[in-house]
Image (spheres, helix red, strand yellow):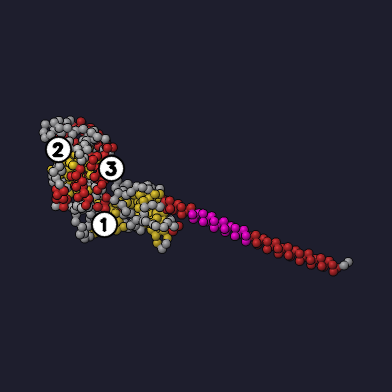
Amino acid sequence: MNIKPLRVLIIVTIFTSVISIGCGIFIYNDMKEREEVSLNVSRARKSLIKDEDVLIKIKSNYNSNVKTTKDTKLYIKDNDEYKDAGSINKNNILELEIVDNISLDNKYFKLLDSDYYVSYKDVEPTSDTINKRYLNYIEFPLEVTIKENITYYEDDFKELFTLKNPVTTKVVVNLDDYYGISLLSRLVYVKKEDVSNTIEVDSSEEIAVSVPAILYHFIYLDGDNSCNDIICHSEEQIDSHFKFLSDNDVFTLNTSEVLSFIKGEINLPKKSILITIDDGARAENFIPFLEKYGLNATLFLVSSWYPVSKFQSPYLEIASHTHNMHTTGVCPTGQGGGINCLPEKEILNDLKLSRETLNNTKAFCFPFYEYSDYSINLVKEAGFEMAFIGGSTKIKKGIDPYKIPRYPILSSFGVDYISNLVLG
């Protein structure tokens, strides 16, 4: 047997096998590397797509005003970490800090004038706004510290949000059982029992000791000379009065603020006034002037005379002047408004119908400024919390809220008269 060729064959076979195995390993490793590279590229692409999707969502959910889409958490930022700081209920408006260039770093939106944040996932843009009228009130010289893990309430005392940390701030509204404070860019309420400390602080701001309420009747547009009565107003008169109030930054009140002032629940700026309009005839002609100067007024409407829709404006509050009892000669005294002598059931039916027609308003105005203990008791029973008369005196804290005085404005009264009421 020839051994040598066999050895050569074995060696060649082994060598060939080694080369094959080596090539196989090389090819396998190369394929694995290619596969890993491909996977990394795929992961990177997916990550990039995901980041783009998140950025699109962040941008679409960001707005100066947003609304919570569910009961959700509030956060505070601590060393670049967002920690649970409380919760806020669904469908509540939040104001956000302005961000010029939204990026992936903005997954938590910072609330305006606050240390709190909310996740971009839990809000959506809204055109709704927060009522900011409380910013015109003068804070009480009272600072309170609110305990940890306390619930804060809306003005209707529904739960709004809960904060884990204590809060120290000044009092804006002082009710029997609640303090109203400014927090998260809104007026919120906290139970007095949830306050751990109260201290008096110095304040140099002037507050109103009394405020005037003025009363207009009928505005006649230029060219219409059909009314020469002393309670008919020209466009020129109304424009000059309202321009003065606007130029002098006079705070124009609504009726609920007047009631809160009477009760001592709020402090008003020294330059404050309530503008009222009686009856409803031609009252829509006041709206362009209110909107032009950004002033608020209250229309005491005889609700059977004109539809409420005729007077729609964010600057005009609608309150009651009875449903259909603004008629002379019904009762034997004064101008004879029926509210002072008609049967109790008839009066109550009228007053309740008026309230229902006017969105359950709490404010009432006596026809012809005439009232009695009888009519006042029925106004209370119908659910009104305040009533207006004449009297030409200013409104002061502690007065009877069912005898709130007003100054009737006559056609001859110029700007000096308004100036004296507000600044005098």
Question: Residue 294: x and y, percent?
Answer: 25, 48
In reply to whether residue 79 is colored magenta, the answer given is no
Q: Are marks 3 and 1 in contact (CB under 8 Å)?
A: no
**Residue at x 40%, y 48% (from the top left corner):** 69
**How packed is label 1: few (under 14 Cα within 10 Å), some, or many (20 or more)?**
many
In the depicted structure, whether residue 335 falls above or below residue 94? above
Question: Residue 263: x and y, percent?
Answer: 20, 48
Q: Are marks 1 and 2 in contact (CB under 8 Å)?
A: no
Residue depth check, mark 1 versus mark 2: number of the one nearer the observer: 2
Of residues 339 and 373, the one drawn nearer to the viewer in this rendering:
339
Q: Which residue is mark 1?
A: 170
**How packed is label 3: few (under 14 Cα within 10 Å), some, or many (20 or more)?**
some
Q: Amino acid at mark 3?
A: Ser
**Residue at x 31%, y 57% (from the top left corner):** 167
In reply to whether residue 47 is colored magenta, the answer given is yes
In the depicted structure, whether residue 249 falls above or below residue 357? below
For the N terminus, the quadrant is: bottom right
Q: Which residue is mark 2?
A: 228
First of labels 3, 1 by sequence position = 1
Magenta-highlighted residues = 33-52
Q: Main secondary structure of the magenta part?
A: helix
Q: Which residue is mark 3?
A: 313
